[in-house]
């Protein structure tokens, strides 16, 4: 209830304030865009009542005289004109920093980190042209842009090759056979007779060649660094809402909108998810979305050179709304921040 009463009180206060108006005469000076301001002053003359009443003091009456106009210090301001539609054409270029954002719920952390480290963002740019339609200070802008995004692909890895060698090992061997034969020697000169066993040694030496089948494992390690300049080309269709604040020499325009990106070409290399230690051609590894979208936020300034021509500048920030990859376990989005410079031309208003 208190809020209702407060609201009613504020409304009444506003109505009462609006009822107090200073009477001002608008007198054109002959130009279309400026007027002088004058103040009308009313004066009154005190006179006595000519018909006296017995027992009463003659009354004093204020009779108005013809008003006179006093000139105030001239104030210049534009005359109110009929609201019209305003058409503007603009062309220029943008320089930006395009940072890739990789994410995935399917890949392990190690592979995802390798993918992030393999890409280094480089300065990107675009050529822009647009047409804006303003009613009062609210406008809609649409147009085309040709954009190139560049990246440095760099990935280093160590490859290990295991080589197994098989071979025969030949050698010469010697085989010696010793044969001993015992002979019985009978001595007949002895009276009783005597006999002696005497050994007889016989040796046979044999030489031959032999071989052994052997295997040997050998390991070789070497480093490989893959480098490539990646390039992505887009046609952009921005649709932007603007609200401008117009001053004497310039105007400020906060803006928000959606940018449609149509990919025209992609070239370069990327880290393969099938074989993470190798680099593959990006078009053979990944399918791209033909159309993607970005949210746009910016603030622009126009400096008026003449009634129709102005120099335009803008700071902007853009964020991808969907991934550029199609049917791929990895998501790629871009965050863009940059500056725009261009020339703006205002056409004759449409009544």
Image: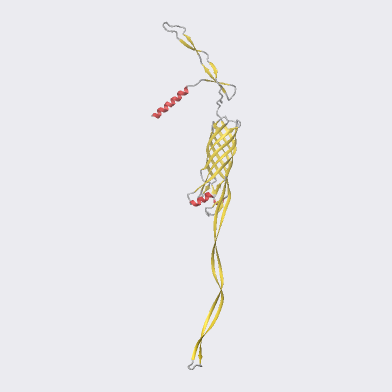
Image height of 42 relative to 34, above or below: above
- Outermost residue on the bottom side: it is 191
Residue 207 position in % (x across, y down):
56, 76
Residue at 52%, 82% (x, y): give it.
179
Would residue 203 be seen by someone viewing this image from the given angle? yes
Q: Name the side, left or right, on which 108 lies relative to 1.
A: right
Would residue 233 be seen by someone viewing this image from the given angle? no
Query: 41 or 333, which is in the foreground?
Result: 41
Residue 53 position in % (x across, y down):
43, 6
- Outermost residue on the left side: it is 1
Q: Quadrant of the N terminus?
A: top left
Residue at 54%, 82% (x, y): give it.
202
Q: Name the side, left or right, on which 46 lies relative to 34.
A: left
> Looking at the image, what colour scheme do you see?
secondary structure
Q: Quadrant of the C terminus?
A: top right
Q: Name the side, left or right, on which 146 lies relative to 11.
A: right
Count of marks overlaid on the render:
0
Query: 94 or 288, which is in the foreground?
Result: 94
Residue 321 position in % (x across, y down):
51, 43
Residue 195 position in % (x across, y down):
49, 90
Query: 317 or 205, which is in the foreground?
Result: 205
Q: In which quarter of the view is residue 129 placed?
A: top right
- Outermost residue on the top side: it is 54
């Amino acid at each position: 209830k208190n809020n209702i009463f407060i609201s009613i009180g504020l409304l009444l206060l506003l109505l009462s304030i609006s009822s107090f108006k200073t009477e001002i005469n608008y007198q054109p000076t002959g130009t279309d865009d400026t007027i002088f301001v004058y103040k009308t002053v009313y004066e009154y003359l005190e006179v006595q009542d000519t018909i006296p009443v017995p027992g009463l003091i003659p009354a004093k009456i204020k009779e108005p005289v013809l008003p006179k106009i006093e000139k105030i210090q001239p104030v210049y301001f534009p005359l109110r004109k009929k609201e019209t539609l305003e058409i503007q054409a603009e062309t220029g270029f943008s320089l930006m920093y395009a940072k890739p954002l990789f994410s995935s719920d399917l890949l392990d952390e190690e592979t995802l980190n390798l993918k992030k480290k393999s890409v280094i963002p480089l300065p990107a740019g675009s050529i822009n042209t647009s047409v804006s339609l303003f009613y009062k200070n609210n406008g809609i802008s649409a147009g085309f842009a040709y954009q190139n995004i560049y990246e440095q692909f760099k990935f280093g890895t160590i490859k290990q090759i295991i080589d197994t060698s098989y071979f025969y090992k030949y050698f010469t061997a010697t085989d010696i056979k010793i044969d001993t034969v015992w002979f019985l020697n009978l001595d007949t000169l002895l009276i009783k007779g005597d006999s002696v066993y005497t050994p007889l040694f016989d040796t046979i030496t044999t030489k031959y060649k032999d071989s052994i089948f052997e295997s040997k494992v050998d390991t070789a390690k070497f480093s490989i660094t893959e480098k490539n300049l990646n390039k992505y080309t887009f046609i952009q269709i921005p649709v932007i809402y603007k609200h401008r604040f117009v001053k004497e020499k310039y105007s400020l325009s906060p803006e928000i909108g959606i940018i449609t990106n149509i990919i025209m070409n992609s070239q370069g290399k990327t880290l393969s998810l099938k074989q993470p230690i190798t680099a593959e051609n990006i078009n053979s590894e990944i399918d791209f979305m033909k159309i993607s979208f970005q949210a746009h936020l910016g603030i622009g300034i126009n400096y008026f050179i003449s009634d129709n021509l102005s120099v335009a500048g803008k700071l902007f920030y853009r964020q991808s709304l969907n991934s550029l990859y199609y049917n791929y376990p990895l998501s790629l989005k871009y965050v863009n921040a940059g500056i725009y410079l261009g020339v703006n031309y205002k056409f004759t208003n449409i009544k």
